[in-house]
Amino acid sequence: MLREFYVTCRVEKWFVDEGTESHGPYLSQHDAVADAIEAAEQLAKPKKAINVLLKLQGSSAELLWSSKKSFASTKASVSAPVSMKSQVREHEAAELMDSSL
């Protein structure tokens, strides 16, 4: 079963929603996204996907992070040379920051 964390903004405050549970408020979108990804990473298992999505009023949900992609990149980077591993991490971090702005 797919689990999803939705990062949302209500009354100028940011929240992370999963099902009927809501966590927050956070002072910024960045803080809410970081917390959602951290929670998803801790709960993720190879066979059970967890997604973090940005859902703003009046728009469709945008995928920010997925445990499927994370497990795939972790598998690939385990066998990669050390310099390649750091490049992969830097690239993933840059993508995350770009997509959350």
Image (spheres, rainbow, N blue to C red):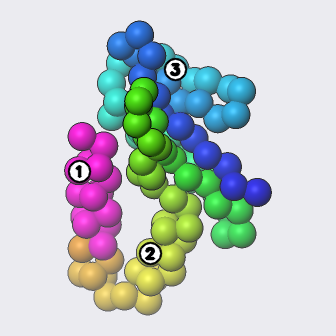
> Residue 70 magenta-drawn?
no
SS at mark 2 in the image: helix
The image shows residue 80, relative to residue 45, as above or below, that is below
Q: Nearer the viewer, residue 98 or 39?
A: 98
**Which residue matches tag 2?**
73
Quick check: 22 left or right of 76?
A: right
Q: Position of residue 1 (x, y in %)?
A: 76, 57
Q: Residues within 10 Å of mark 1 (few under 14, many from 20)?
A: few
Q: Is residue 30 visible?
A: yes
Residue closest to the far right: 1
Q: CA distance from mark 1 to mark 3?
A: 23 Å
Magenta residues, dominant SS class: helix
Residue mark closest to the camera, 1 vs 2: 1
Q: Amino acid at mark 3?
A: Gly
**Residue underneath mark 1:** 98
Amino acid residing under circle 1: Asp
Could you say where residue 64 lies in the image, as x and y percent from the top left?
A: 41, 51
Dot label at residue 24:
3
* Residue range highlighted in magenta: 88-101
Q: In which quarter of the view is residue 48 placed? A: bottom right
Crowd class of label 3 (few under 14; some 14 to 19; many from 20; radius 10 Å): some
Image vertical order of residue 63 relative to residue 29, above or below: below
Between discs 1 and 3, the one toward the N terminus: 3
Q: Position of residue 25 (x, y in %)?
A: 47, 17
Q: Residue at x 53, y 37 (%)?
A: 6
